[in-house]
Image (cartoon, rainbow, N blue to C red):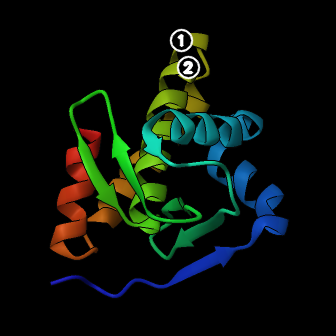
C-alpha cells in the first residue's frame, strides 16, 4: 500500500529556486539534460510547461507536461504518466551528474547528487505498486 507524502510544487516561474537546490552546481545544465533526454526517448515530446516538486523526505523531481511513451536503451518501452516521466528523468539526471562530479573530483557535489538520487528512489517506494514497477524497470 502506498503511503501519503506531502509535496511542494513549484511552477515554471519558480524554477530558478528549485534547480539550484536540486542540482547544485549543475543547475544550469539540468534543464537542458531533462529536455534533451525527453526529446530523445519520449515519443511525441515537443517541450512544454514542467512543474518542479519537492517531497517531505527531501526528494526533488519534475512533473512532465504530459504522459509519454518512453523508449529507453535498456529495452524499457512503455507508456508512463507525467509524474512517472518526471521521476524517471530526474533519476537519470542525478545519476549522470553524479558521474560528472566524480570525474571532475567534486566530492561534495558528487555526494549531493548521489543523495538526491537515493532520496528520490526511496520516495518512489511510496507510490502505488504499478508506478514503482514502471519506474524501477525504466532505471534498471
The answer to whether the residues at label 2 and label 1 have Cβ atoms under 8 Å apart is: yes
Q: Is residue 45 visible?
A: yes
The residue that appears at 31% across and 64% down in the rendered structure is 124
- Label 2, residues with CA under 10 Å away: few <14, some 14-19, many ≥20: some
Q: Secondary structure at mark 1?
A: helix
**Quarter in which the N terminus is drawn:** bottom left
The residue that appears at 40% across and 50% down in the rendered structure is 88
**Quarter in which the C terminus is drawn:** top left
User: Label 2, label 1: how many angstroms apart (C-alpha)?
Assistant: 5 Å
The residue that appears at 71% across and 33% down in the rendered structure is 29
Residue 4 higher or lower than 63, as above or below: below
Q: Secondary structure at mark 2?
A: helix
Q: Quadrant of residue 24?
A: top right
Question: Which of the numbered marks, if any, corresponds to residue 100?
Answer: 2
Q: Position of residue 9 (x, y in %)?
A: 63, 76
The answer to which of 102 and 78 lies nearer the viewer is: 78
Q: Position of residue 137 (x, y in %)?
A: 20, 46
Question: Which of the numbered marks, if any, corresponds to residue 103?
Answer: 1
Residue 140 higher or lower than 68, as above or below: above
Q: Position of residue 79 (x, y in %)?
A: 31, 57
Q: Is residue 119 visible?
A: no
Question: Which of the numbered marks, if any, corresponds to residue 119?
Answer: none
Amino acid at each position: 500500500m502506498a503511503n501519503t507524502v506531502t509535496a511542494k510544487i513549484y511552477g515554471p516561474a519558480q524554477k530558478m529556486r528549485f534547480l539550484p537546490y536540486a542540482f547544485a552546481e549543475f543547475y544550469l545544465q539540468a534543464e537542458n539534460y531533462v529536455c534533451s533526454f525527453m526529446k530523445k526517448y519520449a515519443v511525441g515530446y515537443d517541450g512544454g510547461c514542467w512543474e518542479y516538486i519537492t517531497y517531505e523526505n527531501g526528494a526533488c523531481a519534475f512533473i512532465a507536461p504530459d504522459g509519454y511513451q518512453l523508449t529507453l536503451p535498456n529495452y524499457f518501452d512503455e507508456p508512463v504518466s507525467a509524474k512517472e516521466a518526471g521521476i524517471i528523468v530526474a533519476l537519470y539526471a542525478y545519476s549522470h551528474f553524479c558521474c560528472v562530479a566524480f570525474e571532475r573530483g567534486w566530492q561534495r557535489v558528487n555526494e549531493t547528487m548521489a543523495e538526491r538520487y537515493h532520496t528520490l528512489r526511496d520516495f518512489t517506494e511510496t507510490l502505488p505498486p504499478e508506478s514503482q514497477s514502471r519506474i524501477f524497470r525504466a532505471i534498471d
